[in-house]
Amino acid sequence: MTRQRGQLFIRSGRWSYRIEWVDTRGERRSKREGSFPTKDAARRAMTKAVHGIDDGDSMTVRGTVASYLGEWIETYTKSGKVKPSSASKNREHVERHLVPRIGSIDLAKLTGADVARLYADLLTEGRVRGKVGTGLSPKTVRNIANTLHKALSDGVKWSKLSRNVADGIDLPRFERPELEVWDGDQIRKFLNYVAESGDYLGPIWRLMLTTGMRRGEVLGLHWDDVDMVDKVITIKESRVQVRGVTMTTTPKTKAGRRRVVIDSETVYALAAFRNAQDDAKEKLGAWTSSLVVTDLDGQPIEPDAFTRRFRNVARHAGMPSKTRLHDLRHSAAVLMLTQGVPIHIVSGRLGHANPSITLTIYTHFLPSADRLAADVIGDALSSLNGREMGANLIGLHGTKHS
């Protein structure tokens, strides 16, 4: 709470008030106003002034940035408004990057200049692990900045801060990196390899390539979510790994909870995958999980282990060395776009909140889709024109003979 002292006094028949307080910089301030006809009028004016102080740039804030951020992250994590994976990332930002750099500053004395220096330092010297003296990427710095901004905004809401000093501070410019996308030949080569090698997870790699599902979404699938008759998969959970701990969560947005149609070949592949599990279950006499992605001992495959297995298969299949599991999602999206699938359909299958996100990510690949659209409409018009010309010729000959 704000520490303030107020007093009423009368002079020359008129009432006045005087209040004193300590502002956010620890400096003592005061305000005096008079010429009120009654004591009650002066008291009401003083009360209004005090409330104005509490709503303005005047609060006394005790403690360091570190103590406040520690309190904030605990409250934020327990608020029920943030997913465990996101809360864990926020905690990492606080503990690994924010507290070591600005934690010792008195919260009341934190300035925009401090925040600007923080961002610059993260860009040049922010890496905690790996090569010393190297900075974090602009995207990572922006993510850390978002955490700090949220913490300070909540401080304003909780009446611990009068304003958010991170407002208006320039963030590092972020340019989306070029996507690593497989072309049709690479996709065919990869699928042929997993088929010929008998890779147990081959049907799952195919599922990811045909739907663009995220790793967590695939790992969160239960067999009850797979309708092989109607050829539809229902995505409603995600299994993620945070600091070595695997947890099940729900999609971040409403769009993430979706139903995706799958093709017949993928249905056949999943059916064969299920049969292999059923055979193993019969031999074992028990099965420990209802999840789709398990090993043949019934144990779920952990997210990081799933990624390692993909990298191993991709390497043996002769895929580019920088290939990531997430590139399957990008490859699926680009394949759909280049085959002329409408952007809003692609967006829905990927679980994006709106098509503009899809456009932002895959805009570089739209020219090829645009050329495809031009060819399609051109062929259609040529076909129509050909039929009309034929009809006209028939009409002309008919007139001639009549």
Image (tube, rainbow, N blue to C red):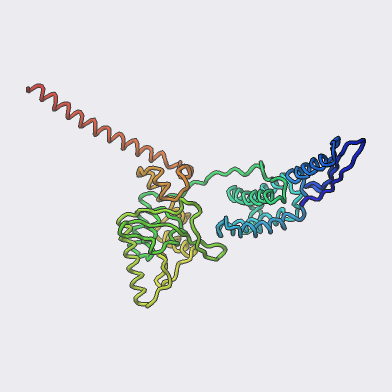
Quick check: 266 left or right of 256?
A: left
Quick check: 269 left or right of 56?
A: left
Residue at coordinates 33% horizontally, 58% vertically from top-left? 266
Could you say which is closer to the camera, residue 203 or residue 2? Answer: 2
Q: Position of residue 27 (x, y in %)?
A: 83, 46
Residue at coordinates 75% horizontally, 55% vertically from top-left? 64
* Residue 222 falls in image quadrant: bottom left
> Is residue 131 visible in this depiction of the protein?
no
Q: Name above or below for residue 142 compared with residue 281.
A: above
Could you say which is closer to the camera, residue 344 or residue 308? Answer: 344
Quick check: 24 left or right of 177?
A: right
Residue at coordinates 73% horizontally, 44% vertically from top-left? 55
Q: Position of residue 328 (x, y in %)?
A: 42, 54
Q: Position of residue 382 (x, y in %)?
A: 26, 32
Q: Name above or below for residue 264 compared with residue 119.
A: below
Residue occupying the far left of the picture = 402
> Is residue 140 visible in this depiction of the protein?
yes
Q: Position of residue 84 (x, y in %)?
A: 56, 60
Could you say which is closer to the camera, residue 50 or residue 313? Answer: 50
Count of labels shown?
0
Q: Name above or below for residue 378 compared with residue 325.
A: above
Could you say which is closer to the camera, residue 121 or residue 47? Answer: 47
